[in-house]
């Protein structure tokens, strides 16, 4: 009986030490990461409506990019050199794999440049009162 | 090596198949698959803002998917609990843990849905394993999932295209909260052990 109480209290001590060590490790690890990501958030300024081309990712589809950046779908497909038919539901990553477009980064760059070119060729009309 | 991953697959799925992909992703996440649910809810909020998916449908399917997954992991805990009960059911530690969960389990279920999310699945398993009433579990679970979807969906909607940065911060902050919780429980247990040992020393009769 006494032996089981002793082993139980020893187990309790190990559990306590384990929890404290785990807690300290998690607090330090995630605390540093949280501070780092908070600084990044502050630096980015968090402009909700921004259409920065740097935010284009490999999981995005051409119709989504077209909608988000106000660029016609057909134009983007044309710039990538692929037909729109059967490709509207595919991500940029999938299109790269299927059409061998020179790598994921190359596809992202091609789309970014196409959007910047379109925006330069079609500047938004000046706002009223300016 | 292929550069495809599940996070990207579900994000693309949300763009092409709409809110049903969100529901499936959250269901799988609640079952224990490594699916970043909070990131998807944030992304869905941003997609609603951009007019890509319908807000009310996305919110409904998100809550249904997450709650169905939670109920399934509760059921796993309940079935596995039969074995645990037969082995440890008579022990005082198990009885005490069960009574504690019965008293405060609702709060644990609610908070782990949106605040201490890494602890959500263990909580479901413990709830099922300790035979916590399913209807009570479902009520707190539903309340927690609605809070989660409303809170992070709104954040995604508000921050729009910046949701990735917000997601990164939330994920790290959630890990930090789990660390603080572990540390708090550890310190509480330490203080209790010190009190117990002092009380034991005080109650020991002096040696003549």
Image (cartoon, coloured by chain):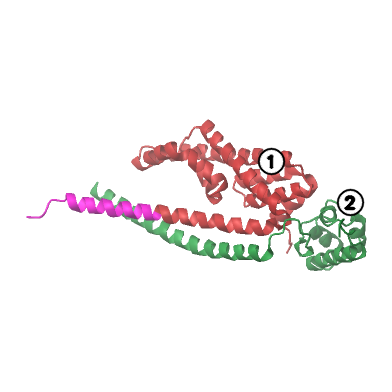
Residue A51 position, x and y percent, is 79, 59
Residue B69 seen in render: no
Q: Nearer the viewer, residue A65 or B128?
A: A65
Position of residue A80 relative to residue B15, above or below, is below
Q: Quadrant of the N terminus of chain B?
A: bottom right
Q: Which chain is green?
A: A
Q: Residue furthest left?
A: B208
User: Label 2 belongs to which residue?
Assistant: A86
Q: Which residue shows up at 73% across the image and 45% down it?
A: B21
Of tags 2 and 1, the one toward the viewer is: 1
Which quadrant of the structure image shows residue A103?
bottom right
Q: Residue at point 66% right, 52% down?
A: B39
As drawn, B69 above or below A105 = above
Mark 1, other Cα within 10 Å: few <14 / some 14–19 / many ≥20: many
| B187 magenta-colored | yes
Say which chain is red: B
Residue A91 x, y percent position in the rendering: 80, 56
Question: From the viewer's perspective, is B197 left or right of A76?
Answer: left
* Residue linked to disc 1: B59
In magenta segment, residue A29: no
- Position of the C terminus of chain B, as image quadrant, is bottom left
């Amino acid at each position: 009986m006494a032996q089981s109480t002793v082993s139980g209290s020893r187990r309790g001590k190990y559990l306590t030490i384990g929890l404290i060590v785990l807690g300290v490790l998690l607090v330090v690890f995630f605390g540093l990461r949280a501070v780092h990501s908070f600084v990044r958030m502050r630096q980015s300024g968090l402009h909700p409506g921004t259409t920065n081309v740097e935010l284009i990712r490999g999981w995005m589809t051409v119709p989504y990019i077209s909608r988000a950046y106000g660029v016609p779908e057909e134009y983007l497909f044309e710039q990538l050199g692929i037909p729109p038919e059967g490709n509207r539901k595919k991500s940029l990553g999938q299109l790269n794999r299927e059409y061998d477009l020179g790598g994921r980064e190359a596809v992202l760059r091609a789309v970014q440049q196409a959007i910047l070119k379109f925006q330069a060729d079609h500047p938004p009309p000046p706002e009223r009162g300016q | 090596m292929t550069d495809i991953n599940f996070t990207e697959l579900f994000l693309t799925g949300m763009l092409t198949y709409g809110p049903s992909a969100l529901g499936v992703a959250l269901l799988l996440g609640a079952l224990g698959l490594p699916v970043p649910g909070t990131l998807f809810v944030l992304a869905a909020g941003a997609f609603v803002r951009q007019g890509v998916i319908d807000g009310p449908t996305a919110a409904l399917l998100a809550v249904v998917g997450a709650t169905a997954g939670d109920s399934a992991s509760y059921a796993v805990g309940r079935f596995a609990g039969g074995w645990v009960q037969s082995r440890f059911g008579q022990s005082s530690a198990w009885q005490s843990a069960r009574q504690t969960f019965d008293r405060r389990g609702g709060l644990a279920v609610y908070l782990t849905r949106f605040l201490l999310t890494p602890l959500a699945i263990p909580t479901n398993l413990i709830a099922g394993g300790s035979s916590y009433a399913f209807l009570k579990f479902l009520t707190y679970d539903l309340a927690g999932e609605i809070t989660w979807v409303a809170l992070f969906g709104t954040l995604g909607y508000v921050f729009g295209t910046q949701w990735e940065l917000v997601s990164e911060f939330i994920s790290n902050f959630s890990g930090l909260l789990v660390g603080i919780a572990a540390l708090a429980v550890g310190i509480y247990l330490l203080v209790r052990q010190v009190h117990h040992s002092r009380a034991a020393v005080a109650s020991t009769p002096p040696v003549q």
